[in-house]
Amino acid sequence: MAEPIRGKRNDITAPTPQNTPLATAPISSHAQQPGVSSIKEEDMNAADSIFAQNPQIVQMIQGRLGSLIGRPSGYIESLPAPVRRRVAGLRGIQKEHTKIEAQFQEEVLELEKKYFAKFKPLYEKRSAIVNGQAEPSEEEVNLGEDEDEDEETKPEVEKVDKPADIPDNVAGIPEFWLSAMKNQVTLAETITDRDEAALKHLTDIRLEYLDKPGFRLIFEFAPNEFFTNKTISKTYFYQAETGYGSEFMYDHAEGDNIEWLPGKNLTVRVEAKKQRNKNTKQTRIVKKTVPTESFFRFFSPPKAPSEEDEEDEEVDHIEELLELDYQLGEDIKEKLIPRAIDWFTGEALVYEGMDEELDPEDFDDDEDEDDLSEDHDDDEEESDDDDESGKPKQETAECKQS
């Protein structure tokens, strides 16, 4: 299990079946910076106008460019025979390299499984303490209290009153996993106020490796008023063939069906609209169930684009959902489960670079920006189908602990 690395880059795109390269890019013998000096804005506007009026031109250009991808440039074929022979030799060496890379990836996976078996007893002990089934030993408490740390270097902790709803004799650590998830930014953005009532019953999150490349995330719940499932799992599968560099490529995910109790499905909401009869002028309330944002949609992963999805915007949207879905699974596997206590306390945010204060000098005032302090009309009529409880929070969850 990889531990957080200070300063780690977070801009790496998660692999999906759509963006994982299947072959090397074509080689050009004249790869250099374009020599166009400048393009005037009016020229760009004229070009946009032409393309807007002739969408078939755009399709023709896109089709032509697509047919060129992967085609040889002719440079290699133009080389002298001895040089082409050397190029072929280097390709042979590269194939041997690829074989070793594949072996390396397989051994890394086996090593990861080996050490996960060593971590598992620790996770089981953590679960017992969180759920009030056991107490930590004195040695564990002493290690956790950092007695060797210099008192002068300890950060000052703001004193707050104990929550009124937590008695002194409470068992375990209430809302442990919910608090940890709310401090993990990518997960926090998926959790709504309505979800929190259900996630308070989350007792453990476990990881299992599949016999073939892939893993399963298992969420355990105490009895609650939302669904009858004791566990809800989600499984991530990888493709049978490895990608460029012999790395395992993500294929798809499958989630368990949630057995919602009547009227408790958090992934939908009820819209109420007024309808007026044209003849009698009488009005009635019509209710309709529509999908809404919820963390529990995580267990209904998106499907890869099909051949029928021809619109670029629709395909791009699906790919973004696939990428986000994969990244959430990786964050739970690689970050949340191994260091749940650090996310509960908020200490893990240090490794994510979230504790750095923003420097006002890094931002420039935009004179053309609209005045955000402008008054707005408070008398705007509210829609009948507004449902604030079904919308995800817009602000990042703050650390609940210090």
Image: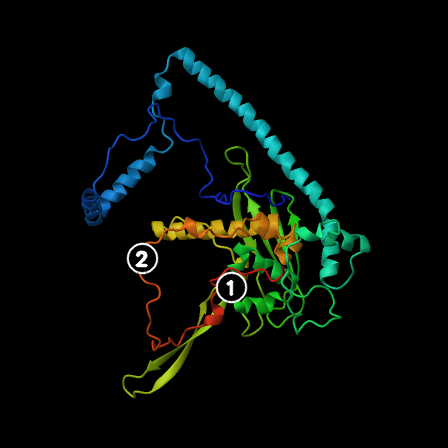
Which kind of residue does numbered mark 2 sit on?
Answer: Glu
Query: At which x and y percent is residue 350?
Result: 58, 50
Residue shown at 51%/42% (left/top)? 9
Image height of 214 relative to 227, above or below: above
Q: Name the residue under label 2.
A: 369
Q: Residue 294 carries which label?
A: 1
In the image, 306 versus 402, the foreground residue is: 402
Residue shown at 53%/55% (left/top)? 185
Q: Using the numbered discs, state the Cα–Cα distance from disc 1 to disc 2 in whole angstroms.
A: 33 Å
Residue 256, visible in the rendered structure? no
Residue farthest top in this picture: 82
Q: Tell whether label 2 touches label 1 (CB within 8 Å).
A: no
> Which quarter of the image is occupied by the C terminus?
bottom right
- Mark 1, secondary structure of its residue: loop
Q: Is residue 391 left or right of residue 383?
A: right
Query: At which x and y percent is residue 255?
Result: 56, 56
Q: Which mark is residue 261?
A: none
> Which quarter of the image is occupied by the N terminus?
top right
Which kind of residue does numbered mark 1 sit on?
Answer: Ser
Q: Which colour scheme is used?
A: rainbow
